[in-house]
Amino acid sequence: MPDSELSQQALDLLDRAVDAMGGQRRDGQHEMVRRVVAALESGDHLLVQAGTGTGKSLAYLIPLIVNSLTSDKPAVIATATLALQAQIVGRDVPRLLAALKPMLPRAIDVALVKGRSNYVCRQKLAGGFPTEDTGEGALFSLGEDNVAHPPSATSGPTSQLGKEVVRLREWAQETDTGDRDEIVPGVTDKAWRQVSVTSMECLGAQKCPMATECFSELARARGAEADIVVTNHAMLAISAFEGIAVLPDYDVVVVDEAHELQDRVTGAVTGQLSVQMVQAAASSTRKHTAVSVDALQASAAALDLALAGVPEGLFPQGLNEVQSQAVEQLRDAVRAALSDSKPEGNAAADGGRSIARSRLNLIFDLCERLLVANDAREVVWASRPGSFAPGKGYQKADENEPAVLNIAPLSVAMKLREGLFADRTVVLTSATLAIGESFQATAGGLGLLGPSAPTWTGADVGSPFDYPKQGMLYVAAHLQKPGFGMSAEQLDELEALITAAGGGTLALFSSRRAAEDAAEKLRKKLKVKILCQGDSSMSGLIKQFADEPDTCLFGTMSLWQGVDVQGASCRLVVIDRIPFPRPDDPLVTARARAVAQSGGDGFIAISATHAAVRLAQGVGRLIRSSQDRGVVAVLDSRLANASYGGFLRAALPPFWSTKDRTVALGALKRLSGK
């Protein structure tokens, strides 16, 4: 079938842009451009898998640029990570627009829109918000009127936090965007909280006296006038699900890093309710309104009693009777406090009252969700500080801490179908969307399967890399099935592999503790330098790893997806075990049970699918250019021996594979050239 006029226009621009930037033609990139244009013309949604090296950013940016020349609405690009967001806005878009400038009839405007807490708040800088921090790090001191006042010019801070705050105040007078990412070097979260507000704390454009100068509002205004808006998955979720106008009205969205969308959306709509939250809300209400907080304090005590001794983990039936009564009591107390603290219609903006009411509103919404969780197909579980939180994983919990109630949707599929896919064209792309040749698992999790599902197509445009010639997959099938932690047998295998490679190893672990233990033990045995996550900033570690060809880098999940190191510096990637979610993960447990109750295989549909995508991401760290050569070694024999091993391997690039240790060590010795 011949290309459409729009498709031919986009392909011509692609060829010219690639030529102007000194690149090479990539067939997969051309095919992706055709697929994206076809989706824009038909209105059907598209899932497109574009392997490493395809150049997928250009393959969707150019169709969006062509579309913007005739569309009266902006297009949106949503990424999962700040790193890709920064790459698109800071590198890909400027280079592309510079290359295309002579060929376009007008300039293309691209805007970056983030959540409110990413921008400095002018109202807070001016003293329009109270502060709970009266130490030296506080941005303001509380006067007798209980309002925050900027410090005098003669009082200089001595602590590191105080110095950071002063630097932030000076920067805020000069910045054009108020965007935290502009600050170099960066500042701590604690310092940033002194000059920013969350969306819940914000007074709102209708009430804030500095709304016309608000950096967040200005960014959104620029977005409304732009041709293309770049944002993140969380903002996309808020816009789609909550009806809050954080993004302009748009007709096309490209979701990059789409393998993360389901988890990111789940994280964005997951809520937590704790006794500490209620106490903080009561404190703010007492301090900034004339409302009695006796009922709030009594409900906090009732909730504390209802959660006393509650074990961590899933509540299969939701709240029990005592817990439900405590949450009902809390909801009613919060409802009364919200009613009594409502400001007069013509009252001046009051930052303290706004914070108090935002805390109360959040608690009220959580209570409402918890009380109807079963009917609304939401999952409820208890946790303690240090235990599971969506998107953050696990750490050891403190059993002496009070329990926290958590709530999250059993599935975000229908939310996505109704909120995201119903009224616009959606293009989802990633290097890891399909397992084998099937997009069914991804499509199902996003609401694209089942009765009344919207129309979509799936396409794998491949990769320009010759995986069988460039890389080897070695599975240590002779090792015992992994137990808790890294076994001595696995450690010996890792030592042998690094020795044969002469360094140049990225070792990916399932836990921070496993990475640190392995680094500590092997530093005593090996002559090569071993860096470990936590030794320095992530960007600093990755740069050092890339600059020193024989250095090794050990780390966890953030390295599974966040490393793009070409050349000999990364000639060996080692994965300690298949990255299954934890068996006691409440959401995984609930979702697997739901699949099983519907007659499906909960393990394959949830745990194995999750592992397959994560494993493919980790394996994908090895070959990043057409000149790269190397070995991926998986120290988990289940990939070779378990019944589900073939399912997992189907998600991986088609490396030449072996279970022969001698063959793998020999290949690494040849690569090291030593």
Image (tube, helix red, strand yellow):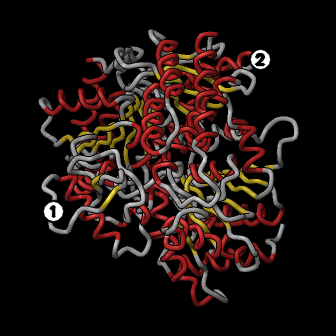
| Element type where label 2 sits in the image | loop
Query: 377 above or below 419?
Result: above
| Pointer 1 residue | 155
Crowding at dot 1, Cα within 10 Å, few <14 / some 14-19 / many 20+, comes out as few
Q: Nearer the viewer, residue 669 or 1?
A: 1
Q: Nearer the viewer, residue 265 or 557?
A: 265
Query: 636 above or below 361?
Result: above
Q: Is residue 352 in sight in this rendering?
A: yes
Q: Is residue 566 left or right of residue 378?
A: left
Q: Earlier in the sequence, mark 1 or mark 2?
A: 1
| Element type where label 1 sits in the image | loop
Name the residue at 77% across, 19% down.
598
Tell whether label 2 touches label 1 (CB within 8 Å). no
Instruction: Give the quarter of the image for residue 660.
Output: top left
Query: Marks 1 and 2, Cα distance to the nearest angstrom?
Result: 69 Å
Q: Is residue 383 left or right of residue 63?
A: left
Name the residue at 58% across, 64% down.
205
Crowding at dot 2, Cα within 10 Å, few <14 / some 14-19 / many 20+, comes out as few
- Residue 599 — which label? 2
Name the residue at 73% across, 71% down.
73
Name the residue at 56% across, 16% down.
314
